[in-house]
Image: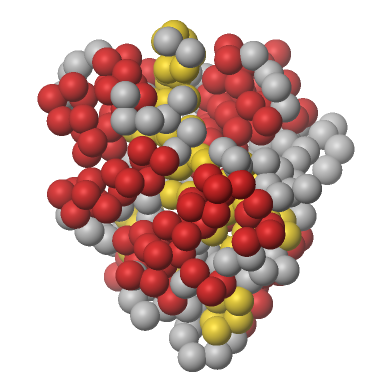
Amino acid sequence: MTDLVTLGETMALFTARRIGLLRHARDFDLGVGGAESNAAIGVTRLGLRAAWIGRVGADEFGEMVRSALAGEHVDVSRAVVDPDAPTGLMVKGRRTSEAVDVRYYRAASAGSRLCPDDLDPELIRSARVLHVTGITPALSASAREAVRAAVAEARAAGVPVSMDVNYRRALWPPERAAAVLRETVEAADVLFATEAEARLFTGGQAAPGGDPAEAARALAALGPRHVLVKLGARGALEFSDGQVRRAEPYRVAELDPVGAGDAFAAGWLTDWLDGASPERRLATACAAGACAVTAQGDWESLPRRADLELLRLTGTAGMADAVDR
């Protein structure tokens, strides 16, 4: 049995090594990045099994994506190699020491051509949870139908559905996103959202400066049994079983915020699948998110169990020298 199955686009990632406008960048690091595969890696690093369904081009970047995920023990056997479209690209830089600038080149990419025929129904039916995000439905009509089909397959088999809203303004306007994603929100058992993302579906109940607990309750009224609201520097809260639980953030030196939300979701889902208490799983999610921002890269600093224990014991998010990799 696979613990977590997810689907979406993973791209080649070019990260500028110097701060400033991308037009002045001369040196880049090459890696991979994608919200869904980040979550899959986060789960495997914490000891569970994950599988990723997606499309890559028949190119060197596509080979790199599959190799990188396989190297992190993510099952990529259902990944489709598309001979007619390239692997998508993401370029990341820092305009200033605090402002991250991310550009996507994914129009007509292999990942955007994901479709229902790419799914493995048996894999989804045998999973302990299906994890999707709001990014994939924005890529194309076929990708949107793939997410819809995967969720329907999971629901029919009694497999819990997890959704991270992950709204991307560059992909579609908020009104369109809210209309399309509402169906998946209502079908989800677990929902991850920021305060801003909550406003896509709840309007005034998640007004800026309002009580995030009210936003969580409003989201739960749409269907999810567990609602996680990420509050950034203010921590996070969970609404489930009629109760609101809050967790304080870990104070760490932030180097790269990209991937923190994926780490948060992976930490929570792993502990939830392991049967941890609500307090424990929320604390793990916050610790995982804190670890994720301490190094560059979408997934490179996703924690292992020893990293989380180090953070809990010392309050320091860093990779322990003595950790057994």
> What x and y, as percent, mark residue 174?
19, 48
Q: Is residue 38 left or right of residue 190?
A: right
Image quadrant containing the C terminus: top right
* Residue at the image point whose x is 33% and y is 70% from the top: 141
Closer-to-camera residue (136/26): 136
Closer-to-camera residue (239/83): 239
> What x and y, as percent, mark residue 91?
41, 65
Does the image show residue 179?
yes
Q: Is residue 51 above or below residue 267?
A: below
Q: Is residue 313 left or right of residue 286?
A: right
Closer-to-camera residue (36/205): 205
* Residue at the image point whose x is 68% and y is 59% from the top: 122
* Residue at the image point whose x is 38% and y is 18% from the top: 234
Hey, which quadrant is residue 148 in on the image?
A: bottom left
* Residue at the image point whose x is 72% and y is 27% from the top: 274
> What x and y, as percent, mark residue 94?
36, 52
Q: Is residue 109 left or right of residue 179?
A: right
Hey, which quadrant is residue 236 in on the image?
A: top left
Does the image show residue 105?
no
Hey, which quadrant is residue 75 in on the image?
A: bottom right
> What x and y, as percent, mark residue 258?
45, 46
Q: Is residue 15 left or right of residue 270?
A: left
Q: How many marks?
A: 0
